[in-house]
Image: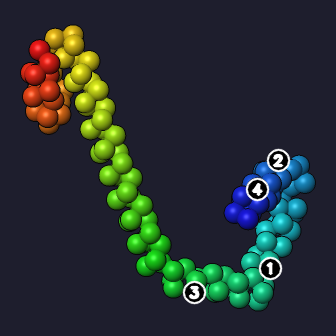
Amino acid sequence: MKGKILFLAGLGVGYVLGTRAGRERYEQIKAAAANLWNAPVVQKRVDEVQEFVKDRAPEVVEFVADGAKKVAAQVSGRSGGTKKTASRSTTSSGSGSKSSGGRSSSTKKPASGSNS
């Protein structure tokens, strides 16, 4: 639905900007758009949508906040996995494992110490 509205709006803007009909046609289109927007049916729908958004806004905020927390947890978990992989590769090459993964190298030291 949103895509269709955006497409039609873009089509209208493109027509208005690209047409050679002149200022008179532009004024006709502008008046028609204003009449459509100010129509009672359209304004009734606008009011309904505004009320719906007001009612649902707290739920949407909570949903987005929960989603952001989940994504942050996943990203921090993945970045920790990346650090572990990076510290393994730097440990095998013998350069700077202390700087690349302070936390992960402390959990890996006993394992690598017992293997060496």
* Residue that mark 1 sits on: 35
User: At 26% from the left edge and 38% from the top edge, which residue is drawn?
Assistant: 80
- The numbered mark, 2 or 4, whose residue comes first in the sequence reads 4
Find the distance from the CA under tag 2 to the CA under tag 4. 16 Å
3D distance between C-alphas at marks 1 and 3 = 23 Å
Q: Where does the C terminus fall, quadrant-wise?
A: top left
Residue 75 percent across, percent down from the top left = 35, 45
Answer yes or no: is residue 13 visible. Answer: no
Q: Which label number is shown at residue 51?
A: 3
Q: Position of residue 53 (x, y in %)?
A: 55, 79
Query: Which sits in the foreground, 22 or 4?
Result: 4
User: Helix, strand or loop at disc 1?
Assistant: helix
Tell me, yes or no, whether the two marked residues, 1 and 3, touch with CB atoms within 8 Å.
no
Q: Quadrant of residue 89?
A: top left
Taking the image as drawn, is residue 14 in sight? Answer: yes
Q: Position of residue 64 (x, y in %)?
A: 43, 65
Give the residue pinned by disc 4: 7
Q: Residue at x 70, y 84 (%)?
A: 45
Q: Label 1 sits on what residue type?
A: Asn
In the rendered view, does 38 fall on the left or right side of 99?
right
Q: Earlier in the sequence, mark 1 or mark 4?
A: 4
Query: Could you classify mark 4 by the number of other residues whose Cα lies within 10 Å: few (under 14), some (14-19), or many (20 or more)?
Result: few
Name the side, left or right, on which 61 lies relative to 107. Answer: right
| Rendered residue at 79%/72% (across/down) | 33
What separation in Å lies between label 3 and label 2 (alpha carbons)?
Answer: 37 Å
Give the farthest residue toward the front: 114
> Which of marks 1 and 2 precedes in the sequence?
2
Mark 1 / mark 3, whichever is N-terminal: 1
Q: Toward which corner of the image does residue 107 lie, by quadrant? A: top left
Nearer the observer, 47 or 25: 47
Quick one: 103 or 24, which is closer to the camera? 103
Q: Label 2 amino acid?
A: Gly
